[in-house]
């Protein structure tokens, strides 16, 4: 007789439910999708699994992931942020501007992060003091910051940037790009924040301090988003006015939702978001490698996004029935 046979029918049912739940976790499902897309892309073009191409996929995923970490914190707390694209641009442009003015790169990076913090506090002021819903507040600041970036630069990119700064985004160690290491450190920090601190428990509980959770999400999220913009500027070697915008905002929100963060808050994990960001990056790359017209990207991402939200609804229904 096996250990499972000795369990009561109810216990065996719980064990089966637990096993099924483990298989249906967002991370597990997304990894399976990533593998299937990788196989299909490799059949179409064997160069897809070339190490250099795989590194390119990881580099692209890093930018989505770093921004999505902050957005995840906010969404788990019950908010939604549409200003990430503009803050991404603001962080990169501020740092690039300071670099071209002769400021050492450590101070220039601090200036870019400070600009992101200011944007975060502006959002907090609008949400907490003016009682504007986060989705409207962040959408408004998206347009304001985007407009200010264009006015301040005259719509022109800022370049050239010092080689020492560019190395931060273009260098590698033992073949691993620096920006992938940055993402690992940031991801671990956010995982610890959500899973091992009282603040993370409060955010997931969605209890009596929802405003504080949203405010902290806006504050921390803006730092991470500005940092992502700075890393991107180091990677491409310039501060680009069109680097962020609505496309980046929607990509980050999509990565968060695909990664299993619930649209209604309370559910989700940083590991799921990491896999979601990797999936988005893989789709972009696979279509290019397979010589598929880029317009199909939107169709595929849209289908995956709808599926992810539908699965989230089913997951919440199952959770509610289990607790009841």
Image (spheres, rainbow, N blue to C red):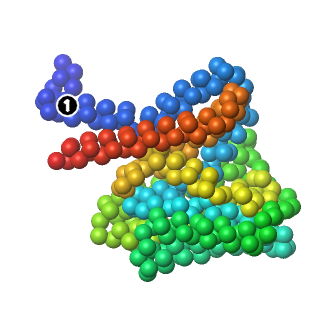
Q: In this view, does 48 lie to the left or right of 134?
A: right
- As drawn, the residue found furthest toward the bottom would be 129
Q: Is 170 rendered above or below residue 216?
A: above
In this view, the residue in front, 232 or 283, is: 283
Residue for point 43% across, 73% down: 132
Q: Is 175 rendered above or below residue 112?
A: above
In this view, the residue in front, 189 or 256, is: 256
Residue 67's x, y, as percent?
Answer: 58, 56
Report if residue 74 is visible in the image: no
Name the quarter where the N terminus is drawn.
top left
Residue 238's x, y, as percent?
Answer: 80, 59
Quadrant for residue 300, please give it.
Answer: top right
Q: Is mark 1 on a helix, strand or loop?
A: helix
Residue for point 68% across, 45% down: 59
Residue for point 47% across, 56% down: 72
Report if residue 172 is visible in the image: yes
Q: Is residue 218 left or right of residue 19?
A: right
In this view, the residue in front, 2 or 212, is: 212
Residue 311's x, y, as percent?
Answer: 37, 40
Q: Name the residue under label 1.
A: 13
Badge 1, how many Cα within 10 Å: few under 14, some, many 20+? few
In this view, the residue in front, 124 or 274, is: 124
Quadrant for residue 57, please give it.
Answer: top right
Q: Is residue 90 left or right of residue 251?
A: right
Q: Is 300 rendered above or below residue 198?
A: above
Q: In this view, does 94 lie to the left or right of 317?
A: right
Residue 88's x, y, as percent?
Answer: 64, 61
């Amino acid at each position: 007789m096996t250990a499972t046979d000795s369990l009561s029918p109810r216990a065996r049912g719980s064990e089966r439910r637990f096993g099924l739940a483990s298989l249906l976790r967002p991370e597990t499902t997304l990894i399976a999708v990533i593998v299937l897309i990788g196989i299909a892309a490799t059949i179409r073009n064997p160069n897809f699994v070339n190490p250099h191409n795989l590194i390119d996929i990881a580099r692209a995923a890093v930018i989505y992931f770093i921004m999505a970490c902050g957005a995840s914190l906010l969404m788990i707390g019950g908010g939604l942020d549409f200003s990430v694209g503009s803050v991404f641009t603001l962080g990169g442009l501020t740092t690039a501007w300071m670099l071209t003015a002769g400021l050492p790169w450590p101070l220039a990076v601090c200036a870019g992060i400070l600009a992101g913090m200011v944007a975060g506090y502006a959002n907090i002021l609008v949400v907490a003091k003016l009682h504007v819903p986060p989705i409207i507040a962040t959408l408004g600041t998206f347009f304001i910051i985007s407009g200010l970036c264009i006015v301040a630069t005259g719509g022109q990119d800022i370049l050239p940037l010092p080689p020492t700064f560019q190395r931060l985004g273009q260098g590698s160690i033992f073949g691993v790009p620096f920006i992938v290491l940055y993402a690992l450190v940031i991801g671990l920090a956010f995982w610890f924040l959500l899973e091992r601190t009282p603040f993370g428990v409060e955010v997931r509980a969605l209890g009596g301090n929802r405003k504080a959770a949203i405010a902290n999400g806006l504050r921390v999220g803006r730092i991470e988003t500005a940092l992502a913009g700075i890393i991107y500027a180091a990677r491409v070697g310039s501060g680009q006015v069109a680097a962020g915008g609505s496309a980046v905002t929607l990509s980050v929100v999509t990565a968060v939702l695909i990664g299993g963060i619930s649209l209604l808050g309370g559910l989700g994990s940083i590991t799921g978001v990491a896999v979601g960001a990797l999936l988005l990056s893989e789709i972009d790359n696979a279509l290019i490698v397979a010589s598929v017209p880029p317009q199909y990207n939107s169709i595929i991402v849209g289908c995956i996004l709808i599926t992810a939200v539908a699965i989230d609804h089913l997951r919440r229904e199952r959770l509610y029935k289990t607790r009841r």
